[in-house]
Image: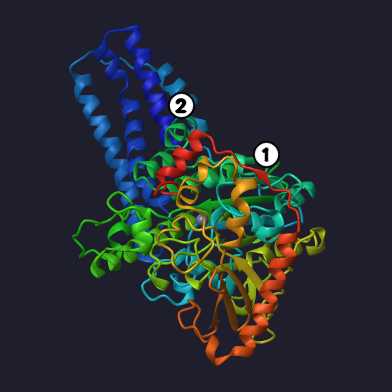
Amino acid sequence: MGAAGAAIGFLWGFFASVASSHWRAALARTSPFAIILGIGIGLLVWLPRVAGGEILEGAKLWKSALGGIAAVVGGALAGHFALSWLARRATPRPWPADLAILLLIALPAFLPSRRVPNSSDRLNVLLLTIDTLRADRLGFTGYPQAMSPHLDRLARRSEAFALAVTPQPRTLPALASLMTGASPHTHGVRDNFHYTLGPASTTLAEVLRNRGWVTAAVNSNPVLSHDSGIYQGFATADDRGDDWSRLTIVRGLRRLSTLAAMRTRDRDQVVTRLAADWLKHRASPGRPFFLWTHWLAPHMPYEPAPPFDLSFDPGYEGDYARVLDYDRISKGDMTYRNPLPPRTIEHAKALYDGEVATSDRAVGALLREVEVTGDLDHTLIVLTADHGESLDEQAYYFNHGDFVYGPAANVPLLIASPENSSGTISRSTVSLIDLAPTILERAGVGGDAFAAEGRPIPHAPAAPDADARTIPLFGESDFCRFPDLNDRLGFLLPLEVAQNPERIPDWKEKWEAQAIRAKQRYAIVAPWKLVLSPHPAGDRLELFDVSRDPLDLVNVSAAHPEITKNLEGLVRRWMQEGEGRGTSAGERILDEETIARMRALGYIGK
Ligand SMILES: [Zn+2]
């Protein structure tokens, strides 16, 4: 901001002078402006590091501060000497008016941003969701290679949940469940393409807005574009965090750090900057806010922002160095028939970890903004994911959605309340459908303000394993986009219907029932998880002990026939109850632009 003001001031002064007299005299007068431009350039070099959200402590902090000062002073001196040299060759004439006008223009840019924390006695709510973030690839969940210092730091003042799941491992259905506290068969959004969240659904944002919260959402995933219905109750929703040309014009000129984030093609930092801008400039700053921010990095393509593109596997020099996408291998082949050699698969996992680190850095930058605005002590923070990602488990590679196994169904979950900075780990079984009632209860609205299937999560007990909640949880897969490659499920859609979801006008009448029948389902009653795979030759049942085997790798149903039978009864009853209900979901017709944005991310395409 300061740098932008200085640059504008310099240009103004320069051109004003050129218009009035000889160009060399004009240059002479602009020497002070050159100094300020130099400061601007110095800040531009320095800011991206700071805006990058790196945690700076001890020697690193000093190094960064000295680097910043050196860049600013160096830039200023270089600007000054360059123009002074030119000035000596002309007739220097002081022009104080220019300087005065410049200062007048630039001064507001150097003033600190307006920072008025929430002055009401109600908590702000900050909902942070990271797309495709596996629960087990983070430092606080015990992954030794993780670079997630910001999430780990948040975990130290949060309740962390070791057994949190999504009701469907696909973006829109999962987040519709989070917002409504309902299963996909209740809100009716069963996949990313064919449904909108109906206006009759009550959302977390609507309840909070009606009780006086200022609501806003920021996101860059086209699946969550405005026509999805997910923004019900949000007073403002910026769903175009991936539209960089628009951002350059609208935001970039106001915040050079946004430009810096775009320069590194770090879309998660752009999302953070948009959210931080909203925090700083929001209307009614004295009222509590509900801000939902959704980052996308761990989703395919795996293309971590520097330096995380090289952090986890710097020695790899093959075809997929620094980027894994569908350019060389189709999505179906990548997902089901993965032909990549083991060394490349290892590199792909390193790239995924790099994506997680990219998101962690962006979340850290936003958390710091909340700290700077003075809101942290007055904010309930909930961090989770819409779903995880299968890396190679169950021979399902770098994708999610077709199955309900642990890698994609498990999600990380942190709840940080200002009054409860405990750092506890809960083994209660919880689902994304529990979050809306939980947030409402902890924000003081009352969990019963909301007709949800989910239930408020009690505070984690101080002692691990004490009184862990074990209510049954249920969920489903998406429909499978690759019926020709998937031999594990039956009743799958015909290939042309499954692979062109955006072009099936008679979905509801002709194909919906079959798509729903073909879904895999799960029931969890800790420590057991049953997975039901529909098949014409007889449904297949698998049982897993999630306390020992959270990724669902070892089927133990043969050793526990009674438990398998009980859970099968539960899941079939849940399906029957749910499928019998009508829903208020609308029909989604994707426009060309959204289709193009989805295609760029590999959502659409073979
Ligand atoms: Zn997603």
Q: Is residue 503 above or below residue 125?
A: above
* Foreground pick, 63 / 568: 568
Q: Residues within 10 Å of mark 1 (few under 14, many from 20)?
A: few
Residue at the spot of label 1: 283
The image quarter containing residue 156 is bottom right
Choose the circle earlier in sequence order: 1 or 2: 2
Q: Residue at x 79, y 50 (%)?
A: 211
| Mark 2 within 8 Å of ligand 1, using the beta carbon | no
* Foreground pick, 540 / 229: 540
Identity, as a three-letter code, of the amino acid under mark 1: Ala
Is residue 369 visible in the rendered image? The answer is no
* Foreground pick, 239 / 293: 239
| Mark 1 within 8 Å of ligand 1, using the beta carbon | no
Q: Is residue 480 above or below residue 36?
A: below
Q: Residue at x 44, y 46 (%)?
A: 604
Residue at the spot of label 2: 103
Q: Residue 63: give x, y in percent of width and height.
A: 32, 58
Q: Residues within 10 Å of mark 2 (few under 14, many from 20)?
A: some
SS label for mark 1: loop
Q: Residue 302: give x, y in percent of width and height.
A: 36, 56
SS label for mark 2: helix
Q: Residue 363: give x, y in percent of width and height.
A: 49, 57
